[in-house]
Image: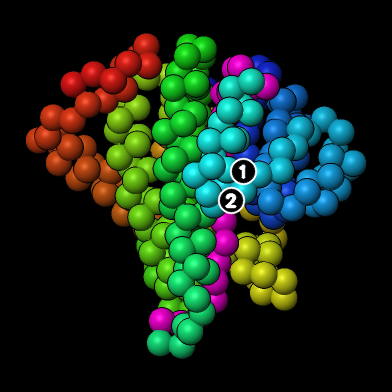
Amino acid sequence: MVYVTAQTERTVLITGGGSGIGLGLAERYLAAGHRVMITGRGSARLAAVADRHPGILTFTNDVATPAGREQLADHVRRTLPELDVLINNAGIQRRVGIASDRSPWAEAQNEIDILLAAPVHLGQLLVPHMLAHGRPAVLVNVTSGGAFFPQPFAPLYSAGKAALHSYTVNLRHALKATRIRVVELIPPAVATELAGSGQAHGALPDDFCDSVFPMLDGTHPEVGYGPTATPEFVEQRAAERGAFDVLSGRFEVPLYGSGGRVEA
């Protein structure tokens, strides 16, 4: 089943949607006729997006904190009663080697909170809301090629994305009996401001978004581009999913039921 199509209006929420990949996807969902809300910490940046694209809703919010995530979830429940697509895209990348890192721990904790705690917590908060309306839905977690090829210049970023990859596999399993499909979007290096101004390199954001957008309909468990879409990489991920399916069958864990209940 195709879960999100250009012919059917859907409601889409994208965290970190003020620039880069998040904004590129928001523009494409809007052009396809969907209702789109983006979030981010920078109110001026979100206002600039709203000026360029009056159809995009914005919400200034910090997903790095539990209170910020709960605030966002409350806002979504009030304003987006039928949330069909959740894209956990907000990200940060500190470029600092392990041996040379002398920054306060709060900076590392902030990176962990944005990369891992935010998508995990938002999923817990919003999956019941997405199940409640009974429509097919898609939850997209944005990881990275760095989850599979650790980057010495960004070790905590690589670790955070690897952890999110692992969690996404388990989330897909937990939702397999429902109408929510879980997609892992795996960008390679894309020329955005992820690591700060002056650090952009890699694929052009428009090229990346043009390629992956049609594949975020829920029919592809993993979506990559360039080095994360080679036959070898795709085969490795398929083998990994097959091994997980075998292993997961050995354990009885609660799963979401088709009606949103948690069942043993």
Q: Residue at x 46, y 72 (%)?
A: 105
Residue 68, by quadrant, is top right
Instruction: Identify the image quadrant of the C terminus.
Output: top left
Note whether 258 is above or below 60 in the view shown. above
Confirm or deny contact between disc 1 and disc 2 (CB under 8 A).
yes
Q: Three-letter amino acid code at disc 2?
A: Ala
Along the line of sight, the residue nearer the viewer: 109 or 91: 109
For residue 229, say whether it is visible. Answer: no
Q: Is residue 32 left or right of residue 131?
A: right
Tell me where the magenta segment starts and ends, as one range: 79-98
Residue 241, image x, y percentages? 28, 43
Q: Which residue is mark 1?
A: 15
Type of residue at label 1?
A: Thr
Q: Along the line of sight, which residue is nearer the eye, 236 or 128?
A: 128
Q: On the rendered structure, is 250 left or right of 142?
A: left
Residue 202: percent from the left, percent from the top? 63, 68
Residue to which mark 2 is pinned: 90
Distance Cα–Cα, label 1 vs label 2: 5 Å
Mark 2 residue element:
loop
